[in-house]
Image (tube, rainbow, N blue to C red):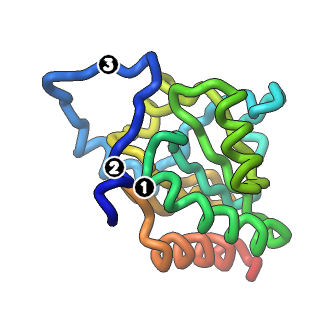
Amino acid sequence: MAEAQFGFDPPGSAREAAHVAVPTVQANGIVGASAPDFTLQDTNGRTVRLSDLHGKVVIVDFWATWCGPCRALMPRLEQLHRRLRDKGLVVLGLDVGEDAAKVTAFANQQKYTFTLLMDAEPDVTAKYFVEAYPTTFVIDRAGRIAYRALGGAAEDKLEAAVQAALERSGTK
């Protein structure tokens, strides 16, 4: 990746930390566990509750507009959303630390149509042991975490995880 993708202007709520303790054992053990439920507002103020999506395959992607690797992943998420939504895939982009106006402007400029949720930090990021952005999860129809990618999902692995979750559930 180009070095320019790693430059960003952090949001006003960002704070520099001298040391961060990473709960690696807990984070690694999240695959196979029930996905922690959350309720967040989308960019239009509508409530989205993860548990309401039970029976669907859900991509949950923690991201921000200032994150270069996040921005690199977003077009792939949009492609998956458009191609597989009729087969039961839902894509949720959980923004961290930005306001709805900024996120909406970015999504409109890029023509993203999947659901973007606000205020995922710190409560939801803690539940999912998010260590870096982007962090991407695939949740199967039974509500279990089937896949986790830290710092950007390899496109082939992400798609394979989505396809496997759709097929396991009897839909191809």
Residue at image location 75% in from the left, 32% down from the top = 43
Q: How far across and how far down the image is residue 150, in percent?
A: 36, 54
Give the distance between the C-alpha atoms of the residues marked 2 and 3, in whole angstroms: 17 Å
Secondary structure of the residue carrying tag 2 is: helix
Q: In this image, 15 relative to 100: left or right?
A: left
Q: Is residue 160 above or below residue 29?
A: below
Residue 129 placement (x, y as % from top left): 38, 38
In this figure, which residue is indicated by the disc labeled 3?
Answer: 15
Q: Is residue 146 left or right of residue 45?
A: left
Q: Is 62 or 35 nearer to us in this picture?
A: 62
Circle 3 packing at 10 Å, graded few (<14), some (14-19), many (20+), is: few
Q: Residue at x 72, y 38 (%)?
A: 105
Amino acid identity at mark 3: Arg
User: Which residue lies under the disc numbered 2?
Assistant: 6
Residue at point 41%, 32% (across, down): 9
Amino acid type, callout 1:
Pro
